[in-house]
Amino acid sequence: MEQYIIKGGNALKGEVNIAGAKNAALGILAGAMLTDETVIIENLPDVSDINAFIQAMQSIGCMVEHIDRNTIRVNAIAIDTTEVSESQMRKIRASYYMIGALTGKYHRSRVVLPGGCKIGTRPIDQHIKGFRALGATVDVKGGIVSTEADKLKGTDIYLDVVSVGATINIMLAAVLAEGKTIIENAAKEPHVVDIANFLNSMGANIKGAGTDTIRIRGVEKLHGTTYSVIPDQIEAGTFMFASAITGGNVLIKNVIPKHLESISAKLIEMGCEVYEYDDSVRVVSNGRLRKTNIKTLPYPGFPTDMQPQGAIALSMAEGTSIVTESIFENRFKYVDELTRMGAQVKVEGNVAIIEGVEKLSGANISAPDLRAGAALVIAALAAEGFSTIEDIHYIERGYEDFPRKLQGLGALIEKVTEEKEVRKFKLRVG
Ligand code: EPZ
Protein backbone atom coordinates (compact mmCIF):
# COMPACT_ATOMS: atom_id res chain seq x y z
CA MET A 1 0.00 0.00 0.00
CA GLU A 2 1.60 3.20 -1.17
CA GLN A 3 -0.65 6.22 -1.07
CA TYR A 4 -0.81 9.89 -0.27
CA ILE A 5 -2.81 10.99 2.70
CA ILE A 6 -3.95 14.58 2.53
CA LYS A 7 -5.81 16.94 4.80
CA GLY A 8 -7.21 19.73 2.69
CA GLY A 9 -7.96 23.31 3.52
CA ASN A 10 -4.57 25.00 3.77
CA ALA A 11 -3.84 27.86 1.39
CA LEU A 12 -0.47 27.12 -0.22
CA LYS A 13 2.16 29.76 0.46
CA GLY A 14 5.88 30.08 -0.26
CA GLU A 15 8.27 29.12 -3.01
CA VAL A 16 8.77 25.99 -5.05
CA ASN A 17 11.51 24.97 -7.48
CA ILE A 18 10.52 23.30 -10.72
CA ALA A 19 12.50 20.30 -12.01
CA GLY A 20 13.69 19.63 -15.56
CA ALA A 21 11.05 18.75 -18.15
CA LYS A 22 10.39 15.02 -18.24
CA ASN A 23 9.16 14.99 -21.83
CA ALA A 24 12.19 16.97 -23.06
CA ALA A 25 14.56 14.80 -21.03
CA LEU A 26 13.22 11.58 -22.59
CA GLY A 27 14.04 12.79 -26.11
CA ILE A 28 17.41 14.12 -24.94
CA LEU A 29 18.31 10.75 -23.40
CA ALA A 30 17.53 9.07 -26.73
CA GLY A 31 19.50 11.74 -28.60
CA ALA A 32 22.53 11.19 -26.38
CA MET A 33 22.85 7.71 -27.92
CA LEU A 34 23.45 9.23 -31.38
CA THR A 35 27.13 9.85 -30.61
CA ASP A 36 29.92 7.65 -29.28
CA GLU A 37 31.34 10.61 -27.37
CA THR A 38 30.38 11.44 -23.80
CA VAL A 39 27.27 13.53 -23.16
CA ILE A 40 26.51 15.17 -19.84
CA ILE A 41 22.87 15.93 -19.12
CA GLU A 42 22.03 18.34 -16.32
CA ASN A 43 18.69 19.21 -14.70
CA LEU A 44 17.37 15.71 -15.38
CA PRO A 45 14.24 15.09 -13.28
CA ASP A 46 14.48 12.14 -10.90
CA VAL A 47 11.16 10.52 -11.85
CA SER A 48 10.28 6.95 -12.67
CA ASP A 49 9.71 7.43 -16.44
CA ILE A 50 13.25 8.81 -16.76
CA ASN A 51 14.70 6.04 -14.62
CA ALA A 52 12.91 3.39 -16.71
CA PHE A 53 14.31 4.91 -19.89
CA ILE A 54 17.83 4.94 -18.42
CA GLN A 55 17.45 1.27 -17.49
CA ALA A 56 16.48 0.47 -21.07
CA MET A 57 19.53 2.37 -22.36
CA GLN A 58 21.72 0.37 -20.00
CA SER A 59 20.08 -2.87 -21.11
CA ILE A 60 21.48 -2.38 -24.65
CA GLY A 61 24.97 -1.57 -23.42
CA CYS A 62 24.83 2.22 -23.13
CA MET A 63 26.81 3.48 -20.16
CA VAL A 64 24.86 5.83 -17.92
CA GLU A 65 26.18 7.03 -14.58
CA HIS A 66 24.84 9.55 -12.14
CA ILE A 67 27.17 12.42 -11.26
CA ASP A 68 24.54 13.66 -8.81
CA ARG A 69 20.80 13.19 -8.45
CA ASN A 70 19.97 15.35 -11.47
CA THR A 71 23.11 15.04 -13.62
CA ILE A 72 24.19 12.05 -15.65
CA ARG A 73 27.04 11.06 -17.92
CA VAL A 74 26.07 9.01 -20.98
CA ASN A 75 28.35 7.14 -23.33
CA ALA A 76 26.86 5.02 -26.09
CA ILE A 77 30.07 3.60 -27.58
CA ALA A 78 29.45 0.17 -26.08
CA ILE A 79 25.87 -0.30 -27.34
CA ASP A 80 25.94 -3.93 -28.49
CA THR A 81 22.37 -4.55 -29.60
CA THR A 82 19.57 -2.62 -31.25
CA GLU A 83 16.92 -4.84 -29.64
CA VAL A 84 15.14 -3.21 -26.75
CA SER A 85 13.08 -5.76 -24.92
CA GLU A 86 13.48 -4.28 -21.45
CA SER A 87 10.15 -4.94 -19.75
CA GLN A 88 10.14 -1.45 -18.29
CA MET A 89 9.74 -0.07 -21.80
CA ARG A 90 6.21 -1.36 -22.09
CA LYS A 91 5.28 0.98 -19.30
CA ILE A 92 6.53 4.16 -20.88
CA ARG A 93 5.31 5.95 -23.90
CA ALA A 94 8.67 7.42 -24.84
CA SER A 95 10.12 3.98 -25.56
CA TYR A 96 9.33 4.98 -29.16
CA TYR A 97 12.29 7.39 -29.10
CA MET A 98 14.53 4.31 -29.02
CA ILE A 99 13.27 3.54 -32.54
CA GLY A 100 14.23 6.97 -33.90
CA ALA A 101 17.64 7.06 -32.22
CA LEU A 102 18.68 3.47 -33.03
CA THR A 103 17.42 3.69 -36.62
CA GLY A 104 19.19 7.03 -37.04
CA LYS A 105 22.53 5.74 -35.79
CA TYR A 106 22.58 2.01 -36.56
CA HIS A 107 19.92 1.83 -39.32
CA ARG A 108 18.03 -0.87 -37.46
CA SER A 109 16.00 -1.41 -34.30
CA ARG A 110 13.63 -3.84 -32.62
CA VAL A 111 11.68 -2.13 -29.88
CA VAL A 112 8.65 -3.23 -27.87
CA LEU A 113 5.66 -1.03 -28.63
CA PRO A 114 5.14 1.85 -26.24
CA GLY A 115 2.84 1.79 -23.25
CA GLY A 116 2.30 4.88 -21.12
CA CYS A 117 -0.78 6.55 -19.70
CA LYS A 118 -4.07 5.20 -21.00
CA ILE A 119 -5.49 8.46 -22.24
CA GLY A 120 -6.52 7.36 -25.71
CA THR A 121 -5.64 4.96 -28.51
CA ARG A 122 -2.32 6.70 -29.17
CA PRO A 123 -1.29 5.35 -32.56
CA ILE A 124 2.27 5.80 -33.87
CA ASP A 125 1.44 5.82 -37.58
CA GLN A 126 3.00 9.25 -38.09
CA HIS A 127 6.30 8.08 -36.58
CA ILE A 128 6.25 5.06 -38.90
CA LYS A 129 5.36 7.20 -41.90
CA GLY A 130 8.40 9.38 -41.12
CA PHE A 131 10.84 6.44 -40.79
CA ARG A 132 9.54 4.96 -44.05
CA ALA A 133 9.88 8.27 -45.85
CA LEU A 134 13.53 8.37 -44.72
CA GLY A 135 14.06 4.99 -46.40
CA ALA A 136 13.61 2.47 -43.58
CA THR A 137 11.41 -0.59 -43.80
CA VAL A 138 9.17 -0.76 -40.76
CA ASP A 139 7.39 -3.85 -39.50
CA VAL A 140 4.99 -4.09 -36.58
CA LYS A 141 4.40 -7.63 -35.30
CA GLY A 142 3.52 -9.12 -31.95
CA GLY A 143 3.88 -5.84 -30.13
CA ILE A 144 7.35 -5.16 -31.55
CA VAL A 145 8.38 -2.50 -34.04
CA SER A 146 11.32 -3.44 -36.28
CA THR A 147 13.11 -1.04 -38.59
CA GLU A 148 15.86 -1.61 -41.10
CA ALA A 149 17.58 0.53 -43.72
CA ASP A 150 20.71 0.42 -45.87
CA LYS A 151 20.94 4.14 -45.43
CA LEU A 152 18.60 6.97 -44.48
CA LYS A 153 18.00 9.75 -46.96
CA GLY A 154 16.50 13.17 -46.19
CA THR A 155 13.06 13.93 -47.60
CA ASP A 156 9.91 16.04 -47.10
CA ILE A 157 7.50 14.68 -44.48
CA TYR A 158 4.07 16.19 -43.89
CA LEU A 159 2.55 15.12 -40.57
CA ASP A 160 -1.19 14.44 -40.87
CA VAL A 161 -1.66 15.31 -37.19
CA VAL A 162 0.46 17.61 -35.07
CA SER A 163 2.36 15.05 -33.03
CA VAL A 164 5.01 15.86 -30.43
CA GLY A 165 6.35 12.31 -30.44
CA ALA A 166 6.48 11.93 -34.23
CA THR A 167 8.19 15.32 -34.66
CA ILE A 168 10.88 14.42 -32.12
CA ASN A 169 11.30 10.87 -33.40
CA ILE A 170 11.73 11.99 -37.01
CA MET A 171 14.31 14.58 -35.86
CA LEU A 172 16.21 11.81 -34.03
CA ALA A 173 16.21 9.61 -37.13
CA ALA A 174 17.01 12.40 -39.60
CA VAL A 175 19.95 14.22 -37.98
CA LEU A 176 22.43 11.65 -39.33
CA ALA A 177 20.57 10.96 -42.61
CA GLU A 178 22.01 11.95 -45.96
CA GLY A 179 20.73 15.31 -47.24
CA LYS A 180 17.87 17.52 -46.14
CA THR A 181 14.71 16.53 -44.29
CA ILE A 182 11.78 18.90 -43.95
CA ILE A 183 9.07 18.17 -41.36
CA GLU A 184 5.90 20.08 -42.16
CA ASN A 185 3.02 20.54 -39.69
CA ALA A 186 5.55 19.86 -36.94
CA ALA A 187 4.72 20.19 -33.23
CA LYS A 188 5.95 23.44 -31.65
CA GLU A 189 6.03 22.41 -27.97
CA PRO A 190 8.89 23.78 -25.84
CA HIS A 191 10.36 20.29 -25.52
CA VAL A 192 10.56 19.91 -29.31
CA VAL A 193 12.67 23.08 -29.34
CA ASP A 194 14.76 21.87 -26.40
CA ILE A 195 15.58 18.57 -28.08
CA ALA A 196 16.51 20.39 -31.30
CA ASN A 197 18.79 22.72 -29.30
CA PHE A 198 20.36 19.72 -27.59
CA LEU A 199 20.99 17.94 -30.92
CA ASN A 200 22.42 21.15 -32.39
CA SER A 201 24.80 21.38 -29.41
CA MET A 202 26.04 17.93 -30.54
CA GLY A 203 26.73 19.25 -34.05
CA ALA A 204 23.36 18.61 -35.71
CA ASN A 205 21.95 21.14 -38.17
CA ILE A 206 18.27 21.67 -37.28
CA LYS A 207 16.49 24.92 -38.08
CA GLY A 208 12.94 26.07 -37.47
CA ALA A 209 12.12 24.09 -34.29
CA GLY A 210 9.30 26.00 -32.58
CA THR A 211 7.63 26.73 -35.95
CA ASP A 212 5.58 24.29 -37.97
CA THR A 213 8.37 23.68 -40.49
CA ILE A 214 11.55 22.07 -39.24
CA ARG A 215 14.54 21.78 -41.60
CA ILE A 216 17.24 19.26 -40.85
CA ARG A 217 20.44 19.02 -42.84
CA GLY A 218 21.99 15.63 -42.11
CA VAL A 219 25.52 15.58 -40.72
CA GLU A 220 27.98 12.70 -40.77
CA LYS A 221 28.67 12.56 -37.08
CA LEU A 222 27.57 14.07 -33.80
CA HIS A 223 29.87 14.89 -30.90
CA GLY A 224 29.67 15.03 -27.09
CA THR A 225 28.10 17.94 -25.24
CA THR A 226 26.98 19.20 -21.84
CA TYR A 227 23.35 20.24 -21.81
CA SER A 228 20.82 21.38 -19.22
CA VAL A 229 17.17 20.31 -19.70
CA ILE A 230 14.56 23.12 -19.75
CA PRO A 231 12.17 23.50 -16.78
CA ASP A 232 9.01 21.40 -16.81
CA GLN A 233 6.11 23.46 -18.15
CA ILE A 234 3.52 21.00 -16.81
CA GLU A 235 4.98 20.64 -13.33
CA ALA A 236 5.07 24.46 -13.16
CA GLY A 237 1.48 24.69 -14.40
CA THR A 238 0.37 22.12 -11.83
CA PHE A 239 1.78 24.23 -8.99
CA MET A 240 0.21 27.36 -10.51
CA PHE A 241 -3.21 25.69 -10.35
CA ALA A 242 -2.45 24.34 -6.87
CA SER A 243 -1.94 27.91 -5.69
CA ALA A 244 -5.09 29.06 -7.49
CA ILE A 245 -7.38 26.37 -6.16
CA THR A 246 -6.25 26.64 -2.53
CA GLY A 247 -6.48 30.46 -2.38
CA GLY A 248 -2.70 30.53 -2.20
CA ASN A 249 0.24 32.78 -2.93
CA VAL A 250 3.07 30.77 -4.46
CA LEU A 251 6.25 31.78 -6.25
CA ILE A 252 7.06 29.10 -8.81
CA LYS A 253 10.79 29.26 -9.50
CA ASN A 254 13.08 28.01 -12.27
CA VAL A 255 10.52 28.32 -15.05
CA ILE A 256 10.38 29.93 -18.50
CA PRO A 257 7.32 32.23 -18.14
CA LYS A 258 6.83 32.34 -21.94
CA HIS A 259 6.06 28.59 -21.87
CA LEU A 260 3.34 29.22 -19.28
CA GLU A 261 1.43 31.95 -21.09
CA SER A 262 -1.66 29.90 -21.98
CA ILE A 263 -1.86 28.71 -18.37
CA SER A 264 -1.35 32.21 -16.92
CA ALA A 265 -4.03 33.59 -19.26
CA LYS A 266 -6.61 31.06 -17.97
CA LEU A 267 -5.72 31.76 -14.35
CA ILE A 268 -6.18 35.49 -14.93
CA GLU A 269 -9.59 34.81 -16.54
CA MET A 270 -10.42 32.82 -13.43
CA GLY A 271 -9.66 35.84 -11.25
CA CYS A 272 -6.11 35.10 -10.08
CA GLU A 273 -3.21 37.51 -10.15
CA VAL A 274 -0.21 36.21 -12.06
CA TYR A 275 3.12 38.04 -11.84
CA GLU A 276 5.86 37.13 -14.29
CA TYR A 277 9.54 37.60 -13.49
CA ASP A 278 12.65 36.55 -15.46
CA ASP A 279 12.59 32.92 -14.39
CA SER A 280 9.68 32.64 -12.00
CA VAL A 281 5.94 33.33 -11.78
CA ARG A 282 3.80 34.14 -8.77
CA VAL A 283 0.16 33.06 -8.61
CA VAL A 284 -2.04 34.79 -6.05
CA SER A 285 -5.62 33.78 -5.54
CA ASN A 286 -8.08 35.60 -3.30
CA GLY A 287 -11.63 34.48 -3.02
CA ARG A 288 -13.58 32.16 -5.26
CA LEU A 289 -12.40 31.43 -8.80
CA ARG A 290 -14.59 32.47 -11.73
CA LYS A 291 -15.93 30.25 -14.48
CA THR A 292 -14.18 30.07 -17.83
CA ASN A 293 -13.92 27.74 -20.81
CA ILE A 294 -10.84 25.71 -21.67
CA LYS A 295 -10.02 23.98 -24.93
CA THR A 296 -6.83 21.96 -25.21
CA LEU A 297 -4.73 22.56 -28.30
CA PRO A 298 -1.19 21.94 -29.49
CA TYR A 299 1.35 24.57 -28.28
CA PRO A 300 0.98 27.52 -27.92
CA GLY A 301 -2.58 26.51 -26.99
CA PHE A 302 -3.65 25.26 -23.57
CA PRO A 303 -1.81 21.93 -23.00
CA THR A 304 -3.76 18.69 -22.79
CA ASP A 305 -1.43 17.76 -19.92
CA MET A 306 -2.97 20.64 -17.93
CA GLN A 307 -6.61 19.81 -18.76
CA PRO A 308 -7.37 17.85 -15.54
CA GLN A 309 -5.77 20.52 -13.34
CA GLY A 310 -7.81 23.20 -15.15
CA ALA A 311 -11.07 21.26 -14.86
CA ILE A 312 -10.50 20.60 -11.18
CA ALA A 313 -10.01 24.29 -10.49
CA LEU A 314 -13.21 25.04 -12.43
CA SER A 315 -15.13 22.45 -10.42
CA MET A 316 -14.86 24.87 -7.49
CA ALA A 317 -15.35 28.06 -9.51
CA GLU A 318 -18.47 30.20 -9.55
CA GLY A 319 -20.72 29.35 -12.53
CA THR A 320 -20.73 26.84 -15.38
CA SER A 321 -17.57 26.13 -17.35
CA ILE A 322 -16.90 24.02 -20.41
CA VAL A 323 -13.71 22.07 -20.93
CA THR A 324 -13.04 20.62 -24.38
CA GLU A 325 -10.32 17.99 -24.81
CA SER A 326 -9.23 18.05 -28.42
CA ILE A 327 -5.98 16.05 -28.32
CA PHE A 328 -6.80 12.71 -26.64
CA GLU A 329 -10.14 10.91 -26.63
CA ASN A 330 -10.03 9.38 -23.18
CA ARG A 331 -8.79 12.05 -20.85
CA PHE A 332 -11.77 12.53 -18.51
CA LYS A 333 -11.34 9.32 -16.54
CA TYR A 334 -10.68 11.30 -13.37
CA VAL A 335 -14.18 12.80 -13.46
CA ASP A 336 -15.70 9.81 -11.60
CA GLU A 337 -13.22 10.31 -8.77
CA LEU A 338 -13.84 14.05 -8.73
CA THR A 339 -17.59 13.48 -8.57
CA ARG A 340 -17.02 11.39 -5.45
CA MET A 341 -15.50 14.52 -3.91
CA GLY A 342 -18.74 16.41 -4.58
CA ALA A 343 -17.96 18.01 -7.94
CA GLN A 344 -20.75 18.37 -10.50
CA VAL A 345 -19.37 17.42 -13.88
CA LYS A 346 -21.08 15.90 -16.89
CA VAL A 347 -18.98 14.46 -19.69
CA GLU A 348 -20.36 14.31 -23.23
CA GLY A 349 -17.80 12.94 -25.65
CA ASN A 350 -14.76 15.17 -25.48
CA VAL A 351 -16.54 17.92 -23.54
CA ALA A 352 -16.96 18.30 -19.80
CA ILE A 353 -19.66 20.61 -18.49
CA ILE A 354 -18.75 21.73 -15.02
CA GLU A 355 -21.17 23.31 -12.54
CA GLY A 356 -18.91 24.91 -9.99
CA VAL A 357 -19.59 23.91 -6.36
CA GLU A 358 -18.56 25.90 -3.32
CA LYS A 359 -16.75 23.04 -1.64
CA LEU A 360 -15.23 19.66 -2.40
CA SER A 361 -15.02 17.11 0.36
CA GLY A 362 -12.22 14.63 1.03
CA ALA A 363 -12.59 11.06 -0.31
CA ASN A 364 -10.59 7.92 -0.98
CA ILE A 365 -9.64 8.14 -4.62
CA SER A 366 -7.28 6.61 -7.19
CA ALA A 367 -5.01 8.28 -9.71
CA PRO A 368 -6.14 7.12 -13.18
CA ASP A 369 -3.03 8.48 -14.94
CA LEU A 370 -0.12 10.85 -14.39
CA ARG A 371 -1.59 14.32 -14.88
CA ALA A 372 -5.08 13.44 -13.64
CA GLY A 373 -3.42 11.93 -10.55
CA ALA A 374 -1.60 15.18 -9.82
CA ALA A 375 -4.80 17.12 -10.45
CA LEU A 376 -6.72 14.97 -7.94
CA VAL A 377 -4.00 15.68 -5.37
CA ILE A 378 -4.59 19.39 -5.75
CA ALA A 379 -8.35 18.81 -5.54
CA ALA A 380 -7.74 17.01 -2.23
CA LEU A 381 -5.61 19.92 -1.02
CA ALA A 382 -8.56 22.23 -1.56
CA ALA A 383 -11.20 19.82 -0.23
CA GLU A 384 -12.55 19.73 3.30
CA GLY A 385 -11.24 16.88 5.41
CA PHE A 386 -9.07 13.88 4.66
CA SER A 387 -8.41 12.20 1.32
CA THR A 388 -6.28 9.28 0.31
CA ILE A 389 -4.90 8.92 -3.21
CA GLU A 390 -4.00 5.46 -4.45
CA ASP A 391 -2.02 4.38 -7.52
CA ILE A 392 0.49 7.14 -6.89
CA HIS A 393 3.01 5.32 -9.08
CA TYR A 394 1.37 7.19 -11.95
CA ILE A 395 2.15 10.53 -10.31
CA GLU A 396 5.74 9.45 -9.57
CA ARG A 397 6.28 8.92 -13.29
CA GLY A 398 6.47 12.63 -13.82
CA TYR A 399 6.66 14.65 -10.58
CA GLU A 400 9.89 14.76 -8.60
CA ASP A 401 9.32 14.94 -4.82
CA PHE A 402 5.68 15.95 -5.28
CA PRO A 403 4.61 15.55 -1.61
CA ARG A 404 7.81 17.15 -0.28
CA LYS A 405 7.41 20.18 -2.54
CA LEU A 406 3.77 20.57 -1.48
CA GLN A 407 4.72 20.22 2.20
CA GLY A 408 7.20 23.07 1.64
CA LEU A 409 4.19 25.22 0.68
CA GLY A 410 2.29 24.32 3.83
CA ALA A 411 0.22 21.45 2.45
CA LEU A 412 -0.73 18.62 4.78
CA ILE A 413 0.28 15.65 2.67
CA GLU A 414 2.35 12.58 3.30
CA LYS A 415 3.32 9.46 1.39
CA VAL A 416 2.44 6.45 3.53
CA THR A 417 2.89 2.74 3.13
CA GLU A 418 1.06 1.38 6.18
CA GLU A 419 -2.29 1.93 7.85
CA LYS A 420 -0.39 2.84 11.02
CA GLU A 421 1.13 5.85 9.28
CA VAL A 422 -2.33 7.01 8.18
CA ARG A 423 -3.49 6.97 11.81
CA LYS A 424 -0.36 8.81 12.93
CA PHE A 425 -0.86 11.48 10.25
CA LYS A 426 -4.48 11.97 11.33
CA LEU A 427 -3.45 12.31 14.98
CA ARG A 428 -0.69 14.77 14.12
CA VAL A 429 -2.74 17.10 11.91
CA GLY A 430 -5.97 16.78 13.89
C1 EPZ B 1 3.39 13.67 -25.82
O1 EPZ B 1 2.73 12.45 -26.13
C2 EPZ B 1 3.61 13.65 -24.33
N1 EPZ B 1 4.40 12.49 -23.97
C3 EPZ B 1 2.26 13.64 -23.62
O2 EPZ B 1 2.51 13.78 -22.24
C4 EPZ B 1 1.42 14.82 -24.08
O3 EPZ B 1 0.12 14.70 -23.53
C5 EPZ B 1 1.32 14.85 -25.61
O4 EPZ B 1 2.65 14.80 -26.20
C6 EPZ B 1 0.59 16.06 -26.16
O5 EPZ B 1 1.28 17.23 -25.77
C7 EPZ B 1 5.71 12.50 -24.12
O6 EPZ B 1 6.32 13.48 -24.54
C8 EPZ B 1 6.45 11.28 -23.72
P1 EPZ B 1 1.26 13.32 -29.65
P2 EPZ B 1 2.66 11.93 -27.61
O7 EPZ B 1 1.95 12.40 -30.58
O8 EPZ B 1 3.92 12.33 -28.32
C9 EPZ B 1 -2.31 11.60 -32.36
C10 EPZ B 1 2.45 13.24 -19.97
O9 EPZ B 1 1.53 13.24 -19.13
N2 EPZ B 1 -1.26 10.81 -33.04
O10 EPZ B 1 1.58 14.77 -29.71
O11 EPZ B 1 2.29 10.51 -27.57
C11 EPZ B 1 -2.54 11.15 -30.93
O12 EPZ B 1 -3.41 10.05 -30.85
C12 EPZ B 1 2.18 12.70 -21.35
O13 EPZ B 1 3.59 13.63 -19.73
C13 EPZ B 1 -1.60 10.06 -34.18
O14 EPZ B 1 -2.73 10.02 -34.61
O15 EPZ B 1 1.46 12.80 -28.17
C14 EPZ B 1 -3.07 12.41 -30.30
O16 EPZ B 1 -4.44 12.52 -30.58
C15 EPZ B 1 0.80 12.14 -21.48
N3 EPZ B 1 -0.60 9.34 -34.79
C16 EPZ B 1 -2.34 13.54 -31.05
O17 EPZ B 1 -1.86 12.93 -32.25
C17 EPZ B 1 0.69 9.36 -34.37
O18 EPZ B 1 1.55 8.72 -34.98
C18 EPZ B 1 -1.15 14.14 -30.29
O19 EPZ B 1 -0.30 13.11 -29.82
C19 EPZ B 1 1.01 10.13 -33.22
C20 EPZ B 1 0.01 10.85 -32.60
Image: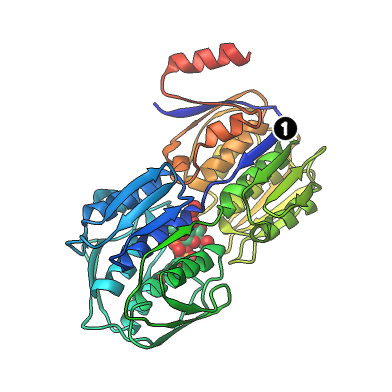
Q: Is residue 1 visible?
A: yes
**Where, by quadrant of the figure, is residue 263 drawn?**
bottom right
Residue named by callout 1: 359
**Where, by quadrant of the figure, is residue 313 drawn?**
top right
Residue 398 location in percent, x, y?
47, 46
Q: Is residue 327 visible?
A: no
286 versus 90 height, above or below: above
What's the residue type where badge 1 is placed? Lys
- Callout 1 environment at 10 Å: few (<14), some (14 to 19), or many (20+)? some
Camera-nearest residue between 312 and 233 = 233
| Farthest-out residue, top | 427
Q: Quadrant of the C terminus?
A: top right
Image position of 303 (left or right of 27): right
Q: Quadrant of the N terminus?
A: top left
Camera-nearest residue between 266 and 233 = 233
The kind of secondary structure element at disc 1 is loop
Residue 28 location in percent, x, y?
42, 61
Image position of 283 (left or right of 255): right
Disc 1 Cβ-to-ligand 1 distance below 8 Å: no
248 versus 158 height, above or below: above
Image position of 48 (left or right of 371): left
